Amino acid sequence: MASLLEQLSSMTVVVADTGDLEAIKTFTPRDATTNPSLILAAAQIPAYQNLIDETLKASRALIGPTAPAEQVVAEALDEICVTFGKEILKIVPGRVSTEVDARLSYDTEATIAKAHKLIGLYNDAGISNDHVLIKIASTWEGIKADLDLTLCWQDPRLVQEGHRPRQLSRPRRSRCGVGHQDLQLLQKARLLH
């Protein structure tokens, strides 16, 4: 008899919600998602300390040897999320979700800039946009950023031909307490935009 996970996999897409690479290898999901709290938990696992150390060194080199530690840490947070995302993509055949910092939830322009930065980090590593999903908070500012990014990342020829937009971002409702009505409004707005 098939396991519960195998039965579920036959009916839906299994997405791992963890930064633990070994757990992802064990359960072989199609997609995976990360967020800062999951990465923090994974960073406590001794086997992943080398990923953290390498990322901190790279961030220090990028920011400069005289930069304050706060700037290095801020840069390293983005880099660490992408580093884990790259490792996850070595395991899963689908996409990895990477979250825009929740502190930017009420700043449309900062959310857009962070999303572009995260996509750029993945692209610099040779990972195409179709393997990355950027998670954006479902605040009004996040919804505006999502709409702007959806149009920005489209191939204009495909939009003119009436193709459905590629999904490179998705609303994230866990951090901001957005209700079902707000999500329905977002869906309507995406169709109208």
Image (tube, grey):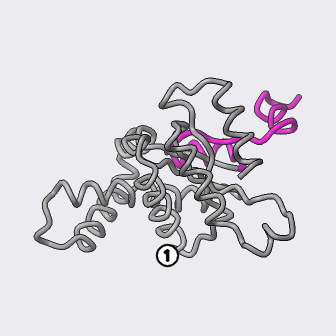
Q: Residue at x 84, y 32 (%)?
A: 7
User: For residue 8: magenta?
Assistant: yes
- In the image, the segment drawn in magenta is 1-30
Give the residue furthest to the front.
192
Q: Residue at x 73, y 60 (%)?
A: 166
Around disc 1, counting alpha carbons within 10 Å, would you say few (fewer than 14), some (14 to 19), or many (20 or more)?
few
Q: Residue at x 28, y 61 (%)?
A: 56
In this rendering, position of residue 43 left or right of residue 192: left
Amino acid type shown at disc 1 = Asp
Residue 59 position in % (x across, y down)? 28, 66
Residue 22 position in % (x across, y down)? 54, 47
Q: Residue at x 86, y 35 (%)?
A: 11
Residue 69 seen anywhere in this rendered image of the structure: yes
Q: Which quadrant of the figure has residue 183? A: top right
Residue 55 position in % (x across, y down)? 33, 63
Q: Which quadrant of the figure has residue 113? A: bottom left
Residue 36 position in % (x across, y down)? 41, 43
